[in-house]
Image (cartoon, helix red, strand yellow):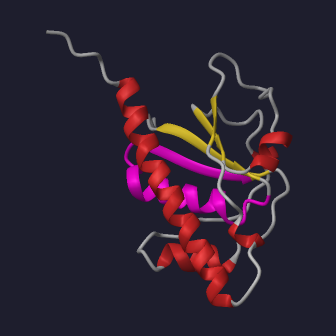
Amino acid sequence: MDNRTKVLFLCTGNSARSQLAEALLRQLAGEQYQAYSAGTEPKPINPFTIQVLEEIGVSTAGLSSKDLSEFLGRQHFTHVIIVCSHAAETCPTVWPGVSGNVPQVRHMFFDDPAAVTGSAEEKLAAFRQIRDQIKEQLVKFVHEDAATLSPACSD
């Protein structure tokens, strides 16, 4: 049995931010977390998403765009991390089929790099910036989550 903590990254399109977060968490702490991503209105993965992950050596194997309905009532997550405000507005407040622990829903909003207009270089720069912001927030998340699981020290 896999005892890693399950984390679902949720976005609207599941084409950029949530995919970046899924792949980055697997690289940062795959031994502690099972990372998944989904969208409330999924679209194909943006090619810049794959490019900015691969250029820093993050595996994109297994990444695919998924609808949130693939997980509702089928899987239990310890954390649901919503990475865009639109998904937060449309995200369910009830998770059918999940008995017992309700997932801890967190918000880590990031600008949508796919919404950037301009040249390919400008778009790529936006994806790199959001990738780096997500990575920074995930490092904090892993550290904070580990701290909540560690027993308190006593003198």
Residue in front for this viewpoint, 77 or 80: 80
Residue placed most toward the observer, 133 or 51: 133
Q: Quadrant of residue 136?
A: bottom left
Q: Residue at x 70, y 74 (%)?
A: 46
> Which residue is at the front of the view, 147 or 123?
123
The image quarter in which residue 1 lies: top left
Residue drawn at point x = 65 percent, y = 60 percent: 17
Please provide percent x and percent y for residue 70: 77, 47
Quarter where residue 112 is shown? bottom right
Q: Is residue 6 above or below residue 62?
A: above
Left or right: residue 51 versus residue 11 is left
* Direction from residue 17 to residue 27 in the image, left or right: left
Q: Is residue 139 magenta?
A: no
Q: Is residue 4 above or below residue 53?
A: above
Residue beneath the point at 79% across and 54% down: 12
Q: Residue at x 82, y 34 (%)?
A: 92
Q: Is residue 129 visible?
A: yes
Q: Is residue 128 above or below residue 87?
A: below
Q: Residue 151: percent from the left, percent from the top?
A: 30, 18
Image quadrant in which the C terminus is located: top left
Is residue 29 a member of the stretch shown in magenta?
A: yes
Q: Can residue 61 be seen?
A: no
- Magenta part of the chain: 13-38
At which x and y percent is residue 116? 74, 75
| For residue 89, side relative to residue 71 (left or right) | right
* Numbered label tally: 0
